[in-house]
């Protein structure tokens, strides 16, 4: 009986609880006690063996049920684990598909970015080239600008000096014009005086004694190789007044051709006039010939001209130039 007891004790140590091991220990101790108390009792030993076999079978059945229960639990756990793993597998498949799609999209985007990068690189190179050429043009323009600025400054300086010279020349020109004007006036005065002197020295005067019309008096003068007097200057008027001022006498002045436009008999311009106050008045619309020595002038000996009707009978003063 010892080998059986030992085997049972080892199994108890391997698979039973502490309580069961204590019970087994108690049975073995009882067997040992029985063996020790009733040495040689065969029947008791057989009964004890049957009891022990029965007891061992009962224990084994309990082990089987426990094992079945454990196996059931293991199946349930295994099934749950398989279910969980299946769900995880499905999730991972979906995630893998999504990742595959994302990978495809990323690949497309990468290709597009690569294309864009290539285009941008080309554009960058073109821009770099353009920048280089523009830089060169800018430098050339800068150089041109500098030279133009220098030329402009030189031209400005030349312009300033030319302006100054022009102003000086303008001033000199004005001064010379003034001087020339004064000289011109002096020359005209001298020419006038010279002309008067020549007129005085080169004319003979004659006064008729018979009173006639302006036309008849002029005719008498012409018959003498002369003409009615033309008074060209103050000196000549003074001379005429002094010589013939006691009589009203025709002079060679008429506005017969155009009323109010007085002309000398040689058609020269009337420049110096010696009309009496209020004359010429074309009295009655019929006074177109001029006299000197007008009686109405009284003591006035210089401005003694007046217009008379041309057929009015007065003497005439002739002038013959030599
Ligand atoms: Ca004269
Ligand atoms: Ca008149
Ligand atoms: Ca008159």
Image (tube, helix red, strand yellow):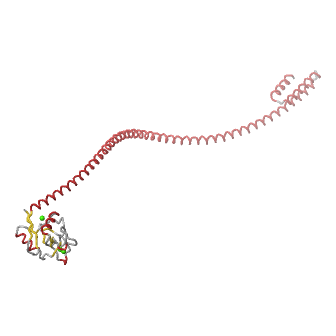
Q: Is residue 293 above or below residue 194?
A: below
- Residue 2 in sight in this render: yes
Q: Which quadrant of the view contains residue 246?
A: bottom left
Q: Quadrant of the C terminus?
A: bottom left
Decide which of 64, 78 is in the foreground and name it.
78
Residue lying farthest right? 37
Q: Residue placed at 47% from the left, 41% from the top?
A: 116
Decide which of 165, 265 is in the foreground and name it.
265
Q: Which quadrant of the view contains residue 135?
A: top left
Image location (x, y in percent) of residue 288: 16, 74
- Residue 267 in sight in this render: no
Residue lying farthest front? 299
Image location (x, y in percent) of residue 91: 64, 42
Image location (x, y in percent) of residue 240: 13, 67
Q: Is residue 54 above or below residue 242?
A: above
Q: Is residue 211 above or below residue 34?
A: below
Residue 116 lies left or right of residue 271; in this view the side is: right
Q: Quadrant of ligand 3?
A: bottom left
Decide which of 114, 12 is in the foreground and name it.
114
Q: Quadrant of the N terminus?
A: top right
Q: How many marks?
A: 0
Residue 49 lies left or right of residue 293; in this view the side is: right
Decide which of 188, 81 is in the foreground and name it.
188
Q: Which quadrant of the view contains residue 317?
A: bottom left
Image location (x, y in percent) of residue 284: 19, 78
């Amino acid at each position: 009986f010892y080998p059986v007891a030992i085997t049972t004790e080892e199994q108890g140590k391997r698979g039973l609880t502490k309580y069961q091991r204590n019970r087994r220990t108690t049975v073995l101790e009882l067997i040992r006690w029985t063996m020790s108390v009733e040495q040689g009792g065969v029947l008791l030993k057989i009964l004890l063996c049957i009891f022990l076999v029965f007891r061992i079978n009962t224990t084994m059945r309990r082990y089987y049920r426990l094992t079945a229960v454990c196996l059931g639990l293991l199946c349930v756990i295994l099934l749950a684990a398989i279910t969980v793993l299946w769900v995880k597998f499905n999730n991972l498949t979906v995630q893998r598909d999504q990742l595959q799609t994302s990978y495809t999209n990323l690949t497309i985007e990468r290709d597009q970015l690569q294309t864009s990068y290539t285009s941008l690189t080309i554009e960058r190179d073109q821009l770099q080239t353009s920048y280089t050429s523009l830089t060169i043009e800018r430098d050339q323009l800068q150089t041109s600008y500098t030279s133009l600025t220098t030329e402009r400054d030189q031209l400005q300086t030349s312009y300033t000096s030319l302006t100054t010279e022009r102003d000086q020349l303008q001033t000199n020109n004005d001064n010379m014009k003034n001087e020339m004007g004064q000289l011109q006036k002096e020359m005209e005065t001298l020419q006038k005086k010279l002309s008067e002197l020549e007129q005085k020295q080169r004319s003979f005067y004659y006064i008729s004694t018979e009173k006639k019309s302006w036309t008849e008096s002029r005719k008498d003068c012409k018959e003498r190789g002369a003409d009615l007097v033309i008074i060209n200057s103050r000196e000549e008027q003074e001379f005429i007044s002094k010589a013939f001022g006691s009589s009203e006498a025709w002079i060679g002045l008429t506005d017969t051709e155009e009323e109010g436009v007085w002309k000398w008999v040689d058609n020269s311009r009337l420049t110096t006039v010696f009309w009496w106050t209020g004359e010429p008045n074309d009295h009655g619309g019929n006074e177109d010939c001029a006299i000197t020595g007008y009686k109405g002038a009284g003591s006035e000996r210089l401005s003694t001209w007046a217009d008379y009707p041309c057929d009015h009978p007065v003497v005439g003063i002739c002038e013959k130039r030599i």
